[in-house]
Image: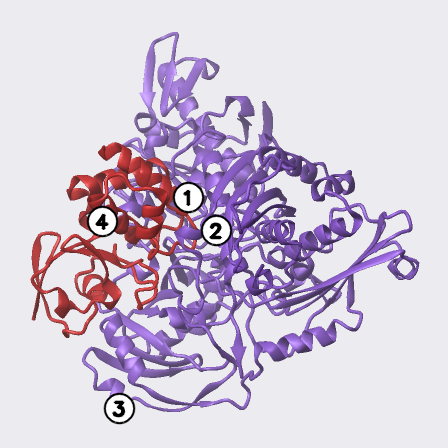
Chain colours: A red, B purple
Amino acid sequence: MIKLTINGKAHQLDVAPDTPLLWALRDTLQMTGTKYGCGQALCGACTVHVDGTPVRACTTPVSAVVGRKIRTIEAVDTERVGKVVQEAWRKLDVVQCGYCQSGQIMSAVALLSQNRKPTDADIDNAMSGNLCRCATYVRVRAAIHEAAKALA
Amino acid sequence: MSKIIIENLSRRRFLQGSAGLTLGFCLPVMAAGAAGKSGVVAASTASFEPNAFLRIGADNSVTVMAKHLEMGQGTYTGLATILADELDADWAHVRVEGAPADAKRYNNTFWGPAQGTGGSTAMANSWDQMRKAGASGRAMLVSAAAKRWNVGAAEIVVRDGIVSHAGSGRKASFGELALDAANETVPTEVKLKDPKDFRLIGKQAKRKDSAAKTNGTAQFTQDVFLPGMLVAVVAHPPQFGATVKSFDATRAKAIKGVVDVVQIPQGVAVLATDTWSAKKGRDALSVSWEDSKAFKLGSDEILAKYKDMAKQPGLVAKQTGDTAKTFAGAAKVVSASFDFPYLAHAAMEPMNCVVQLKADGCDVWNGEQFQTVDQGRVAVLFGLKPEQVKLNMLYAGGSFGRRACTHSDYVMEAAHIVKAINGKAPVKLVWLREDDMRGGYYRPMFHHALEAALDGSGKLVGWHHRLVGQSIITGSPFEAMLVKDGIDHVSVEGASNLPYAIPNLLVDLHTPTDIGVPVLWWRSVGSSHTAYSTEVFLDQVAAAMGKDPVALRLELLTEHPKHAGVLKLAAEKANWGTPLKAAAGERRGRGVAVHESFNSFVAQVAEVTVKKDGSIKVDRVVCAVDCGTAINPDNIRSQVEGAVGFALSAAMSGEITLKAGRVEQGNFDTYPLLRIGDMPKVEVHIVPSTAAPTGIGEPGVPPLAPSVANAIAAATGKFLHKMPFNTAELVA
């Protein structure tokens, strides 16, 4: 049994220790907001927070995150930065297909939690691991600036 | 006001205590704009359903049935905007449900009897239909109120979901009138609004899927879980056309979670209780492949073959004047050839599908782009009638054409797995990224050769364009419609309808039939390569003539005012002709391209910086768009912004290559997509129009690569003849 703390709640999972956190979330707990895109930490669709740091869940074995605080898109609005980012995303209608957006939002929240006034260069750097095939990048940038304004 | 006769509006139904009946299946029905995780339609106690596209609940909910897939292009919001405007609904009460597969009610009116989404037709084919659907619902609500209040219908006003009568001071919400409205006769004629009275169309109606797509609750095929469901991961052959010779599943079956291993026509499927176990099982399989009929050429060999074919005349796709005579007597001939690679769609959600066989039919869960085709094929496999195959519509995590597969490849793969296990469990087929990248159905490779003839006075008098590439349409359900006299229309679209006034024009085509790589439409289809070759070559001709690229185009576009309109607008907004400042050691340039696709017109002006090492940065792209009535201007901007990024990926790095028939790319390390740091600033200007709406999902793509290439040429003097760009040619 693997014990994980996800969004403030304790879970016991009957999965192999090498199981990626992504599949434990999705298939075992049916928390499907975190997406599979590449399986190799190349696209960022599976981004979650582990102790506040953005992590690619597809290459993170569950054994590596035992005892650590895991946060997913499902609980992103339970604290202020997450809620503000989500609202900015909605205000600017950032999404298109939406499949990568959980990951985009988790990366954006991590950025704004550490840097309340990111420049374009800060944004490009922090968001470089998150692919969007619809190329919503213009609005991702704008929404992060929008959220930064709301947080100021 | 225009009067429109309503046809085929016979489905008036009143459903009491059974709102879910409309759909006939139980989960997971998606309601965009509905709150909460489930996404399941809240069962209201009563509803009014004047036609196949609208249901008004006693709870004031206005549900629009979307016959088209929402794959990111904003279709759900657009369809709802059209209907809700004519209905005078309150936008906050509007939500959208994916319609079931039913070609009788939900066919694409541009595709005859077939239901499906593609060719940027969603708004264009639904425009009249959704307006009438909204207007007839409104008329019935008004009629019900007139009777209830005993007043004249003409005195009644409808606004934001409220029906009111000023004289008596009475008013009622849609929900309060729903019961009565259901008993009204469906009108045979309705008045549609004068465009000046639109309250949602042309304004900014917010997307209906933003909430669910920002909190993790949006339901994609990948997110479907059914009781007892197994996940299948498949070992596919390493070359197209190879088949399973034999396999050993001993090691795979020893893995915890693996339930079954079955052979299917597409390979060997490992079924497990979860995705990770299925993947481990698949990786543990030992399969030997029969490759005697496999396609074994590499990209270099295919290209050599195409270049060889280009030496001979092809089938004539378009001919005006006498090109042979013109070129023979030309004072100057300019020529160039262009090469385009296979391209993967690489949607962020790799292809997947859920299939469940039941006693009386089959259920499919899919981000479904090609209902009639997929439904028919699944029905044949299981010996069912098409209507026994229910398609449950989900959001698609991108598609760009991939989910409308002419051969229903991944849908049939899922169905074959279910058949192989005799339907004992529902199955979710999951393609891993590598399966998706190597699964074929690419934008075809193409080779183009162009020549232009200038006469003694320097005038452009002849144009010859020869194309070599596989046909997408041959062998597809669209063959009878789109292949004429051996010419696949989509191979030459954008080339055979060249808008420029050149008196002698020849476009000819070679269609190789012995290349075993499956090909498919990829966002903007033929225009994804023809816009590049025609627009870059025209700049090359302009350079040879010593003419400004915008001025030359305007001279040649006298009979195409819409092309000219967007071209002038983009040039003006981009300050065409003013100098660009470059930092020391850098070269900068501005380039333009204009192209019509899917009946829309887009011009783009790109500003590009070329560094000493040849690397490029696209700084800004100014776009002008004429797509008829702008249903949702913000969504148009969003689509064109995205199209710029999508097309820039292809220009800078998109390339699927084969070696001995094996696809060399597998994931985003070898098939890199544009990342945020390379995304230019994008400005989108929309030409005001009251014409019927035309496409917008695709038309932003074609002009981007040529405008960037022309900007690079302006900065460096070098025209790039290959996509993706070889920046080594640009080293200072």
Residue type, label 2: Gly
Q: Residues within 10 Å of mark 1 (few under 14, many from 20)?
A: some
Do the residues bearing badges 2 and 1 touch, measured as CB atoms within 8 Å? Answer: yes
Residue type, label 4: Ala
Above or below, B702 relative to B685: below
Q: Is residue B561 left or right of residue B630?
A: right
In terms of depth relative to the viewer, which is nearer, B392 or A66?
Answer: A66
Can residue B4 be seen in this snapshot? yes
Label 4 to label 1: alpha-carbon separation: 19 Å
Q: Is residue A21 left or right of residue B25?
A: left
Residue at image coords 58%, 51%: B708
Do the residues bearing badges 1 and 3 touch, measured as CB atoms within 8 Å? Answer: no
SS under mark 2: helix
Residue B624 - label: none
Q: Which residue is mark 1?
A: A138
Q: Are marks 4 and 1 on the same chain?
A: yes
Going from the N terminus, do you reach mark 4 or mark 1 first?
4
Residue at image coords 36%, 8%: B168
Placement of the N terminus of chain B among the 4 image quadrants: top right
Going from the N terminus, do you reach mark 2 or mark 3 first?
3
Subunit under mark 1: A
Q: Residues within 10 Å of mark 4 (few under 14, many from 20)?
A: some
Q: Residues within 10 Å of mark 2 (few under 14, many from 20)?
A: many
Label 1 to label 3: alpha-carbon separation: 50 Å
SS under mark 1: helix
Tell me residue B574's x, y (percent): 58, 36
Q: Which residue is mark 2?
A: B645
Do the residues bearing badges 4 and 3 touch, measured as CB atoms within 8 Å? Answer: no
Q: Residues within 10 Å of mark 3 (few under 14, many from 20)?
A: few
Q: Is residue B2 left or right of residue B216?
A: right
Residue farthest to the front, as pictured: B584
Q: Which residue is mark 4?
A: A110
